[in-house]
Amino acid sequence: MLVVSETKALRAQIKQWQRDGETIAFVPTMGNLHRGHLTLMQEAKKRGTKVVASIFVNPMQFNNKNDLANYPRTLEEDQVKLIAEGVDMLFTPTPEIMYPKGLEAQTFVEVPVLSNILCGASRPGHFRGVATIVAKLFNLVTPDIACFGTKDYQQLRVIKLMVKDLSFDIDIVGVETVREESGLAKSSRNGYLTEQELEVAPLLYKTMQDIAKAVQGGECIELAVAHGIESLNQSELTTDYIRIQNAKDLSGVNDSDKDLVILAAAHLGEARLIDNMVFRR
């Protein structure tokens, strides 16, 4: 696996592959790789002849300096995992490379409306940071395909809308959430949980399952969500939000909408957990 941190070396290799007729599949990450990330690599390998991954802890998408400082960085272990998955190139830029003028002077990309609800409301500026770094990475890697996990459903929708609105010629592929046997979604932030908290955390997914079942059984959405929040808050979890939206565009739900998504976020100890569940009523 080729490992590069400079944009000149990255672009040179990409251009050579493009001249050779290769199809480039890209997986951007912030590292601390787990089975969910590796599933993205496997999907990319199915869809492209060359797989490029990036590891960059993006300061622009953090609104909490302590969260940024404490985010786990495991580059050596990550490289071993990527080699095992047959990744062809890893891009590991520094903040100075990606934001040479600093964050305050950096041109940014912002997807309106969709970036300001749910996680965007709880973490102001988060999706501006996500959209900006993904746009920069897309311009550097110029992939044919890019793979993102559906665990962060809102992020996936933000990226898909950005790609459509800015006319990127990239196929965005959503890859299903990988879960523990308990139902807990795989996440780098699960490493913040104690053993006792790991036993409590699956309640988030179970609560979403219960809400979906209630709605499918005819209960009104508002009541089903209220019952879910009440149940969740009786545990050690503290709800940030639980919402049901239109699965296609995250708009509000109309009576005629059939394809829905439950989006949830909750705090447990030092971790903020997010999850979602698409269902049909």
Image (cartoon, helix red, strand yellow):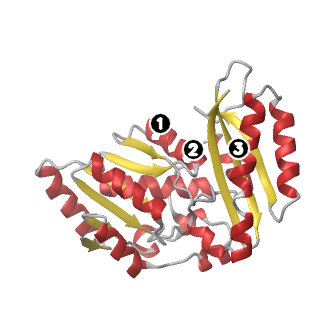
- Element at badge 3? helix
Q: Nearer the viewer, mark 1 or mark 3?
A: 3
Q: Is residue 194 visible?
A: no
**Residue at horizontal 59%, vertical 53%?**
127
Calculate the distance from the C-alpha at mark 1 to the C-alpha at mark 3: 33 Å
Which residue is label 1 attached to? 165
- Quarter in which the C terminus is drawn: top right
Q: Residue at x 33, y 39 (%)?
A: 169
Amino acid type indicated by mark 3 = Gln
Q: Which residue is mark 2?
A: 111
Specify the label residue 99 is tagged with: none
x and y percent of residue 254 in the render? Answer: 73, 23
**Element assignment for label 1:** helix
Q: Residue furthest left?
A: 20
Q: Nearer the viewer, residue 46 or 171?
A: 46
Residue identified by numbered label 3: 209
Residue at 87% x, 35% y: name it.
Answer: 223
Cβ atoms under marks 2 and 1 closer than 8 Å: yes
Disc 2 element: loop
